[in-house]
Image (cartoon, coloured by chain):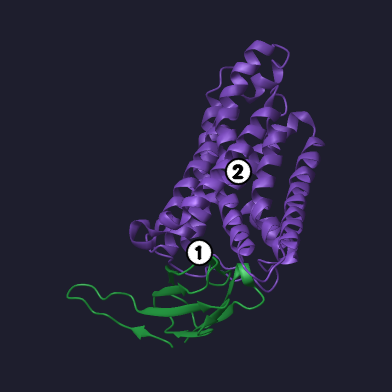
Amino acid sequence: MLALLSLSGPVLAADPEVAIQLHEHHFAPSEIKIPAGTKVKLIIDNQDATPEEFDSFALNREKIVFPKSKAIVFIGPLKPGRYEFIGEFNQQTAKGVVIAE
Amino acid sequence: MFAATLIVFRESLEAALVIGIVAAATRPIAGRGWWIALGAAAGVAGAVGVAAVARSISQWAGGSGQELFTAVVLALAVAMLAWHNVWMASHGRQIAAQARDLGKSVARGEVALTAIVTAIALTVLREGSETVLFLVGIASSANSSRAALAIGSVLGLVAGGAAGTLMYVGLLRVPVNRLFVVTGWLILLLAAGMAGQFARVLIQADVLPALASPLWDTSSWMPDDSVLGTLLRALLGYQAQPSATQVLFYVAALVLIFAAMRRAQSRRPAA
């Protein structure tokens, strides 16, 4: 369920938001498309009972998401390309990619 | 089990290298082993404490608490390492020369050690709290055997400790009159790496702009998760795809701390 909202306030336009869920140590969706050259607010919803670390060398981001809670990570602006990310605590299953185009 | 090993190794590597370098850098100061151990122990206690309240911390500042907390810890560590280097630049030769005069050198040594020991405690706290959260998470997961988790984590810690020990032993082979210069550079690079990380967490929290991101991409010849890449990351703050702002902070820290060291050195009274 990819949610891409673009909110425009009277003075500033807020960054587009993308929601991603962590369920049974899998990211859903595992493939996220965002516009290149745009800063995006990633909202990670950890529905599992254990903490996870959203970790990406390519995106240069690292954040712990607690069980049954959400975490916000700003990514971009990115050049067009594929940027892989993982859940460091469950690397076998928690994998995904951000595609900037 | 080896997933735990790798994660714990990566987290402990930076702290272990800092400890190894600092232990070598403070060699002439009597009793510094106890101080360093105290710093590491304080870091571990702090890590457990932080992990216990990490969930609350992460909710501060509209969800950016984790990044802001990490930024403060990093900034303090950079300040401590910079202070040590500047202090050594103005007093280093005196400590080595007066090592026989125990009274004076211990007093001076304690001043120098406060900064370094704090830096160690902060680094252990920062890396350790992530590790504690990971261990708590896995321990409560239904899938893994606790024994395997424990063994794997201890292995990771041992591997990290081995790396720090290797660094220390390697540095001890440096001729004494060059040791301060070499460790001074290593500590300078550590501080710059932490300054880069400081920028990264603030970019993540949308406090700083990333600017060109990535500024370069060397992931094809030195990937972040390769052995050498991991080592260079811990020692130099190497990243295959850093943001421009990170590189700016890195270079700024290098230049500013180095300049402060040179200034302290030139103001030293003639020996």
Parent chain of label 2: B
Q: Position of residue B44 (x, y in %)?
A: 60, 43
Q: Nearer the viewer, residue A37 or B63?
A: B63
10 Å crowding of disc 2: few (<14), some (14-19), many (20+) = many
Residue B124 falls in image quadrant: top right
Residue B243 in percent (x, y) is at: 50, 65
Q: Colour of chain A?
A: green
Q: Is residue B133 visible?
A: yes
Residue at horizontal 60 percent and vertical 47 percent from the top: B190
Q: Amino acid at mark 2?
A: Val
Shown colour of chain B: purple
Q: Find disc 2 in the rendering and name its residue.
A: B44
For label 2, the SS is helix
Residue depicted at x 78% and y 48% = B162
How many labels, in total?
2
Q: In front of the other: label 2 or label 1?
A: 2
- CA–CA distance between discs 2 and 1? 20 Å
Q: Which residue is mark 1?
A: A63
Quadrant assignment, res A26: bottom right
Above or below, comparing residue A75 to residue B15 in the picture: below
Left or right placement of residue B99 versus residue B90 in this view: right
> What chain is tagged by disc 1?
A
Is residue B148 shown above or below B28? below
Please give left or right for residue B10 compared with residue A56 in the image.
Answer: right
Residue at the spot 77% in from the left edge and 29% down from the top edge: B176
Asked whether residue B251 is in view, the answer is no
